[in-house]
Image (tube, helix red, strand yellow):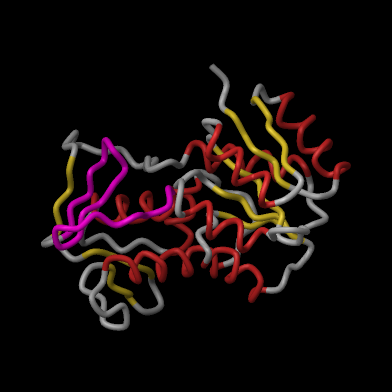
Amino acid sequence: MSMTILVVDDDREIRDVIHIYLRNEGYHILEAEDGIQALELVQQKKIHLMILDIMMPNLDGIKACLKIRELSNIPIIMLSAKGEDLDKIMGLSTGADDYVTKPFNPLELIARVKAQLRGRGFSSLSQSSDQSEICVDDLVIHKEFHTITIRGKEAALTPIEFAILELLATYRGQVFSIDKIYQNVWKDQTAYYSDNTVMVHIRNIREKIEVNPREPQYIKTVWGVGYKIEK
């Protein structure tokens, strides 16, 4: 059964172009022209990934993403004509997993889609352990169910956030640069990305698992090098 991708954009021509390219890759495509329709489809259909435009009538992409995150952890790629870092950070802070700026190369967008679908919590590094749970003090990562428990309570992470946390927890003590995190989580060693992409996800994870995100207990910053979880 092919995976279903929801394309949300008020511009029909853009939806048509994305539809054609994704269909040629074998995906099943659903379309919506605003955030309200997108929310309805998320509740009615099994969707594996969403491409979500920011600037739309009725319910824009930022507000739609916030509402969708209350219902689902499906990967979300934001799409917008705005390319400033502040707009990217805003999109990622609402729970999006990636950000593509218009005008875009459809082949780059397809590469991002494939990277998100491949990167739902799996690391490209070989793992010697087949354990279904990883425990780090009061943090428990349930690999099979893609969920985490922190201090006895379940916390909701996006697929990308989960993948980053799992990577660092699996290789405790090893420092991962931003480049290495991107390569292993997004499965793409060539596509352009901003350092902010990884940094915003790290910040979001800390907000969800740390008592004091400014003094993290779990994900440590190694200044000038990267991030790690202590052994």
Depth check: give the residue in front, 82 or 71: 71
Return the x and y of residue 173 as percentages of the image width and height: 21, 62
Q: Quadrant of the C terminus?
A: bottom left
Relative to 201, is 66 on the left or the right?
right
| Residue ranking furthest to the top | 1
- Say which residue appears at 71% left-offset and 73% top-offset: 84
Q: How many circles with numbers are drawn on the protein?
A: 0
Tell me residue 24's x, y (percent). 74, 24
The x, y position of residue 81, in whole percent, is 79, 62
The residue at 32%/66% (across/down) is: 208
Farthest right residue in view? 13
Residue extending furthest left? 137
Determine the image quadrant of residue 210.
bottom left
Residue located at (24% from left, 49% from top): 170
- Residue 157 x, y percent position in the rendering: 37, 54
Q: Residue at x 61, y 38 (%)?
A: 41
| Magenta range | 139-159
Along the horizontal axis of the image, is 197 left or right of 220?
right
Query: Which image quadrant for residue 197?
Result: bottom right
Q: Report the front residue among 148 and 133.
A: 148
